[in-house]
Image: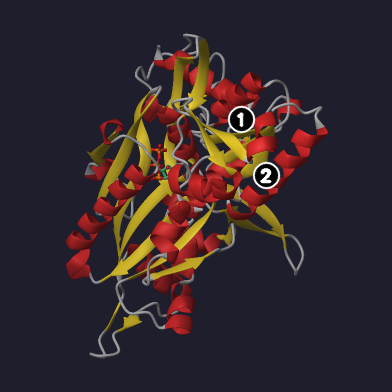
Amino acid sequence: MANEQLMGKIVSLAKRRGFVYQGSEIYGGLAGTWDYGPFGHELRSNIERLWWKRFVSDRDDMYGISSSIIMPEPVWQASGHLQGFTDPMTECEKCKRRFRVDLLEDRVTCPECGGKLGTEKTFNLLFPIEMGSAVGGTVTAYLRGEVAQGMFVNFKNIIDSFHPKLPFGIAQIGKAFRNEINPRDFLFRVREFDLMEFEYFIRENEWETQFEYWRGEMWKWIDEIGLSRDHVHELEVSAEDRAHYSKRTIDFEYDFPFGRKELYGLAYRTDYDLKKHTEASGVDLTYRDESTGETFIPHVIEPTFGAGRTVFAVLYEHYREDELGGEKRAYLALPPVLAPVKVAVFPLLKNKPELVKKAREVYQAVRKEIPQTAWDDNGNIGKRYRRQDEIGTPACVTIDFDTLEDDAVTVRDRDTGAQERISIGELTAYLKRTIVNEALL
Ligand code: ATP
């Protein structure tokens, strides 16, 4: 199947099945914004929970925070974003459409209407907002263009409250905003997105070993969410393409349907940010080694993971089409830990009260231990299977007339369609052991 065709199918499945909708769609849609529906929200939350567990709660050296989205101008002045967070832009003289110059193959002719492209300008990606001020008038603040500054401005707070020893990290999952010139390609290039990120504070002389360590950890994460290593590629970013604060950057690129593009980034930000904030705020952001008395500004390694791009890559990676029992079907072969619904429980027929009653009991019992368990009694059983396959539900449990006699149910596996009879007493333990990964519920 051509990649564009596959992309079309994924976008349409995402909308039809309640994963992702165009933002403000009933008003024609707002470019570069997408709304997550119930299954998209669950999928993204599962990704974020798994990330948080791996990189924050399972470790002793991470401090998780949640900082403000709105930050004042001096933060962005000091961080260099007011000057350096720009993309080169050009506007078509004929149709007035704007393009990001570095993403154009032909920098002279408009790819949309064939008109002549104008001169190159720099375009700042930060979203300014006017905030009401206590002394009248307004002050300019900004929606954060990256979450990292939230970690840097809280560095001293974390030091004062927790007295961590180097190396340690400050982590956060949250929204970032960029006024992208050309939002496009579904969740790939948007104006409002979620980042999972940490700043890992180190001594300067260990930056190379720490960089290598985190590079390895990022690959482990890629394995955990089921992206094939063959579809992810490292790109050593050249000095001229690196962000203003970085001394070394590796992009982890994924084979998206429209080409190989950045999924994640790993940057060595040196002591750039803490130094700049010390100078600009006048607050001392040095670290003091208790055993030697030495004081210095730590350096930083920053692994960054876009949550929206992860959702996109995961949907694309796990989309399958095959024939099962002589019928064509599409399904998401999601790793169970990511599936928005882990188990779907249904009565064979919804108009038989004795089946519904029994099925409800099974449903309540399973969902007590497997939270993302759903009830489904719409349409016939074939339709229910197809619907659950499309959203990637690993296991379906059917309560039929035999259940009333033998207290056993049919469990169907999403990928193979294989069915097994399991007694109700064993069911939850069986599901946890075989289909749903117990450790990650
Ligand atoms: P690009 O070159 O694609 O514009 P960038 O190099 O500016 O990206 P970074 O600053 O490295 O991106 O951003 C960190 C992470 O944030 C990226 O790896 C990506 O996952 C995510 N990201 C960046 N911009 C966007 C966007 N417009 N929409 C969705 N995710 C984004």
Residue 431 in picture, x, y percent from top left: 51, 45
Per the image, the residue denoted by label 1 is 31
Q: Do the residues labelled 2 and 1 touch (CB within 8 Å)?
A: no
Q: Which mark is residue 185?
A: none
Q: Can residue 250 be seen in this view?
A: yes
Residue 276 in picture, x, y percent from top left: 39, 67
Q: Which residue lies furthest to the front in this view?
A: 405
Per the image, the residue denoted by label 2 is 363
- In the image, 241 versus 167, the foreground residue is 167
Disc 1 within 8 angstroms of ligand 1 (CB): no
Q: Residue visible at 46% across and 35% down?
A: 334
- In the image, 341 versus 138, the foreground residue is 341
- In the image, 71 versus 431, the foreground residue is 431
Q: Quadrant of the N terminus?
A: top left
Q: Badge 2: how crowded within 10 Å, few (<14), some, or many (20+)?
A: many
Secondary structure at badge 2 equals helix
Q: Earlier in the sequence, mark 2 or mark 1?
A: 1
Residue 407 in picture, x, y percent from top left: 64, 41
Disc 2 within 8 angstroms of ligand 1 (CB): no
Q: Residue visible at 17% across and 69% down?
A: 205
Vertical arrangement, residue 377 with respect to residue 70, above or below: above
Residue 299 in picture, x, y percent from top left: 29, 67
Vertical arrangement, residue 364 with respect to residue 9, above or below: below
Q: Can residue 92 be seen in this view?
A: no
Q: Is residue 377 left or right of residue 167?
A: right
Front tag of 2 and 1: 2
Q: Badge 1: how crowded within 10 Å, few (<14), some, or many (20+)?
A: some
